[in-house]
Image: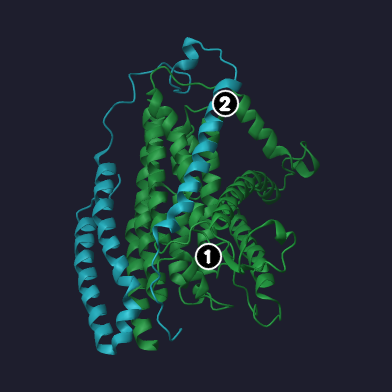
Amino acid sequence: MAAEVAVATISAPHDYLPIIVQLIVVLAFVGGTILATHFLGPKRKSKAKLDPFECGIEIHGNARTPFSIKYFLVAILFVLFDVEIIFMYPWAVNFKENLSVGFEAGMNNFIQMSIFLGVVLLGFIYVIKKGVLKWD
Amino acid sequence: MEFALLFKILIVVGVFVLTLLVALYSTWAERKVSAIMQDRIGPNRAGPFGLLQPLADGVKMFMKEEIIPGQANRALFILGPCLAMLTAGMTSAIIPWGDVITINPESVPFSEYFTFGESKTYIVQAADINIGILYAFGVVSVGVYGIMIGGWASNNKYSLLGAIRASSQMISYELAMGLSMIAVIMMTGSLSVREIVEQQDGFNWNIWYQPLGFIIFLICAFAETNRAPFDLPECETELIGGYHTEYSSMKLGFFLFAEYFNMFISCAIIAAVYFGGYNFPFMHDLGLSDNAIAIIGIFVFLGKVIFGILFFMWIRWTLPRFRYDQLMKLGWQILIPLAIVNLLFTGLGIIVFK
């Protein structure tokens, strides 16, 4: 493992300029392609063609119906845990720097994050035991 | 400054064209790989070895009739694939394709026509920002919206089911992906992809320190790109075509193409983060100039990426598809705890060995 600690680089606003250039390039590609296909393809519409596809049998209602609550729970849990993971990014970036201060500071830092992780894990175990992810 | 900006624009356009080409030829390679694995010949009519097949497919996509179902929500129906393609194309900005290239005005031909000033260095990367990894994760998660919007706007039950499956699968695996990445960031102390690559000089690749993290990240990459064995969103026996059932012409092409874009980008991120990016063993013992090493490095990086793409294809044509509850169980109950264990052991390892 490298002995020196990475010095955090600071990005100036103009470093983000290429991203705007990239956005323009990709937008131009996407917009141009969608427009081109709109004018290039044939247009022969009929009632049956514009119906939603349901394997050829008669269509029952439409798709604006309720769906399983499980998917919603997964989404909510994702938001919860993702926020907790995002908390750990700044800690991870500064982990080595803290350790370079001294063994004690690094160990303290590690133990504190372990406690945080433990609390997150408790919640995680509760969610699993509650059967949120049981699909029958 | 003007030349620097011009260079950046050149890189952005060049990388985009390269991504397009690689994505096009990935479709050809996928067919050839599957053909070889199933003892078939694969595409061989358009051009030698069927090399013109992707172009023929592209032209076909352009010339097909564009159908927007009567019951669909028109604006969102068009927005869905555009968003999927847009996010797929945006991620390549942070990938370091090569090392620093130094341009010296005396040694460059036709230098009298340019006003360079003194010798300058350019990095072969669109945007070297210090939050590269976060940017990639952010853009990738916007990709979920493209699929969700497209599937919902179709107003078709199969599309809706496919879209819900796809988005819940993608967000579930994003958690383990983020966690496995934290371990690498702890080791490198930076979120910039270029710095992560620079620290893997020579053969000091992250894969040697993070084998478990790499496997977790790889599995999550399969799930994020919706490829087999995680291709449940488009599981044809249950859901017809999944979220793109109602799509036709280039809008369908965008969804399919975005998958290959994403595969290319995730292979590039894996190569950069775990396999040393443009670094290769004994790179400083060859006695070459820095520019030569940088140029070889670009090809080494592309070689690693192409190897990754072929590996993705090999997995796709080898493993059967998961069942939905197995998928969720793997994502939540196996990969997330494993990633947390990996993170803790990485932290302890850094403390003990440093």
> In front here: A60 or B86?
B86
Estimate how packed mark 1 is, as few (under 14), some (14 to 19) or many (20 or more) residues with alpha carbons within 10 Å.
many
Quarter placement of the C terminus of chain A = top left
Q: Position of residue B293 (x, y in %)?
A: 66, 72
Q: Chain for mark 1?
A: B
Classify B48 as above or below B78: below
Residue A72 picture location, percent across and down: 26, 42
Q: What's the coloring here?
A: by chain
Type of the residue with mark 1: Ala
Q: Residues within 10 Å of mark 2 (few under 14, many from 20)?
A: many
For the residues labelled 2 and 1, say whether their Cβ atoms are less than 8 Å apart. no
Q: Quadrant of residue A80?
A: bottom left
The residue that label 2 is drawn on is A37
Q: Are marks 2 and 1 on the same chain?
A: no
Quadrant location of residue B334? bottom left
> Which mark is drawn over residue A19?
none
Report the residue at 61% width, 69% height from top: B118
Q: Which mark is residue B272?
A: 1
Q: Quadrant of the N terminus of chain A?
A: bottom left
**Residue at 47% in and 56% down:** B221
Q: Note whether residue B162 is visible.
A: yes
* Cα distance between the residues tagged 2 and 1: 36 Å
Q: Colour of chain B?
A: green
In the picture, one chain is cyan; tell me its letter.
A
Q: Is residue B56 left or right of residue A63?
A: right
Disc 1 element: helix
Left or right: A70, with B126 as reference point: left
Mark 2 element type: helix
Which residue corresponds to the image point at 54% horizontal and 39% vertical from the top-left?
Answer: B256
The amino acid pointed to by label 2 is: Thr
Q: How many marks?
A: 2
Q: Position of residue B345 (x, y in %)?
A: 35, 77
